[in-house]
Structures are given as C-alpha cells and as structure tokens.
Image (cartoon, rainbow, N blue to C red):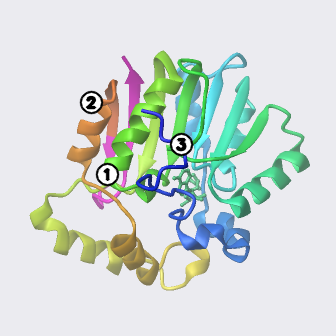
Amino acid sequence: MTTGQGSSWLFDEFAHAGDEHLDPAYVATYDRKAGTDPTADVALLRDLGLDARATLVDLGAGTGTFALAAAQFSGSVIAVDVSTAMLASLRAKVERLGSSNVTCVRAGFLTYQHPPGTADFVYSRNALHHLPDFWKALALERIAAMLRSGGALLLRDLVFSFAPGDAASTIEAWLAAAPTTADRGWTRVELETHLREEYSTYSWLLESMLERSGFEITNVSHSPSRVFSAYTAVKR
Ligand SMILES: C[S@@+](CC[C@H](N)C(=O)[O-])C[C@H]1O[C@@H](n2cnc3c(N)ncnc32)[C@H](O)[C@@H]1O
C-alpha cells in the first residue's frame, strides 16, 4: 500500500514526530543526551555484507550519528527523517565531514519513496514507536518493498518484551532507574511522556508484524529491562 499525504484518514507522521524532535533547542542537545555509539551496529552491518556497493536507508535518522558512521563503509546512505531540525543538524555534519555519499531526505516511514527492491539494508533505531500499531504494520510492509530479496532490516526500538500482567512492575523499575537530569539520558518525566503519548508495542506484536510483512527474524535481543529490543530481519 502506498501511504502518501492527501487523504484525511492518513496518519500525519510529520505532526507525530515527538514535539521535542521538532525543536531546534532540544535537537542541539540531542547527541550529548543520547550518547549513541554506533560501532556495534556498523560492525554487524559489515558482517551482513555492507560494503562500498551497498545502499543503506536509515529511517528516523535523527542527527545522523549512525548514518554518518555507516557511510564510511557504504556505497550510499539515505538518511530519512520527518524533522527539519534533525535534518538541519545532520546536513551540517554531512557538510563538515564532506560525506558525499549521504543524502538527507525529509520524509518518514509512511511517505519516504524508494525504488522498489533496490535497498540492501534498512536501519531504524528508536523511531518506529512514533507510529501506532496499525501504521507500524504498513511501515514494515513499505520497508520490505524497499529491500531486495535477502536484504536486511536492523530494527532497534523501545519494545516491550514483558507480559501485559507484568507491565506495572516492569515499567516502575524502568522509571526508577532513569537519570535525574535530562542532559545525559531520558528522565522519568520524559519516559512517562513516552509511555502516555507514543506507541511502544509488545515484542510479540512487533514480531508478528515483521513476519507478516515478509521478513524472517534471524536475530533478536531483548534488553534485561525488557523495554528495548533489537532485531535483524531478512527479507524473504
Ligand atoms: C529518538 S530519535 C532517534 C534518532 C536516531 N535514530 C538515533 O538513534 O539517535 C527519533 C527520531 O525519529 C524521527 N521520527 C519521528 N517520527 C518519524 C516518522 N514517522 N518517520 C521517520 N522518522 C520519524 C524523529 O524526528 C527523530 O529524529
């Protein structure tokens, strides 16, 4: 299904990006707050075949820490995000580093258009939870359509691998472990907002969506806190 803009029933992903991601002041603090180290995921992609001929799409690329690291080993990287503030930060880095194989595109899971079957890898970290589950399933079908057969999706997100009956105790333990200041992580208040207003889902739902979208899940890792999951999923 093509989910373009223009019909009133369509989810407006540009308006549901997380208000903070649209705020240049927040974006300016993002890298320090996130403290992202892309090393392990870049190494995993290289093990899976990322090389100078490969096309990699990063959906919800944010300030581009991963996209820029992966670009050193890729043919081309397309960094996609709905936020103009995130993309401005990313474009500034691309210019500073002279990363000529990185293209920045303002679009999202539901609107980014990629020639069918031509991407070797799709990467997405901590972004898919901005879509409700109905739209996640459509987004995953769109990702499968971008990838060539045998291409891989690396999906990392806030995903709940606890049973619904354990929600209260697991969530409370997660919130209790949050940092108290916002400069080096997500505080309890920020995590509470995530829980109330965004769309993290259960691992068993997400895994079913992946499989129904034409992926084989070849690796999954759930964090000990049961609130993050990392998937490698290969397009059948
Ligand atoms: C928490 S940040 C993660 C950024 C980056 N992937 C990282 O790991 O640091 C979430 C990103 O998803 C973007 N985003 C939100 N909704 C989106 C959508 N529907 N399609 C693509 N990106 C989206 C936001 O603008 C933001 O840059």
Image region (quadrant) for ligand 1: bottom right
Q: CA distance from mark 1 to mark 2?
A: 13 Å
Q: What crowding class fits label 1: few (fewer than 14 Cα within 10 Å), some (14-19), or many (20 or more)? A: some
Q: Amino acid at mark 2?
A: Arg
Magenta-tinted stretch:
221-236
**Which corner quadrant of the image does residue 82 belong to?**
bottom right
Q: Is residue 129 left or right of residue 106?
A: left
Q: Amino acid at mark 1?
A: Asp
Q: Label 1, on which residue? A: 133
On the image, the x and y values in percent for residue 172 come to: 25, 77
Q: CA distance from mark 2 to mark 3?
A: 22 Å
Can I make out residue 78 in this image?
yes
Q: What crowding class fits label 2: few (fewer than 14 Cα within 10 Å), some (14-19), or many (20 or more)? A: few
Is 65 contained in the magenta span? Answer: no
Nearest to viewer (mark 3 / mark 1): 3
On the image, the x and y values in percent for residue 102 come to: 77, 36
Q: Seen from this angle, which residue lies furthest left?
A: 165
Q: CA distance from mark 3 to mark 1?
A: 18 Å
Residue pictured at 54% horizontal, 84% vertical: 181
Q: Secondary structure at mark 1?
A: helix
Of residue 223 and residue 120, the one placed in the foreground of this image is 120
Q: Label 2, on which residue? A: 212
Residue pictured at 78% horizontal, 58% vertical: 88
Compare marks 2 and 3 and give the one earlier in the sequence. 3
Q: Which mark is residue 145?
A: none
Badge 1 residue CB within 8 Å of ligand 1: no
Quarter of the image for the N terminus: give it.
Answer: top left
Tell me: residue 159, above or below residue 50: below
Q: Label 3, on which residue? A: 4
On the image, the x and y values in percent for residue 227 come to: 32, 59
Tell me: residue 185, above or below residue 53: below
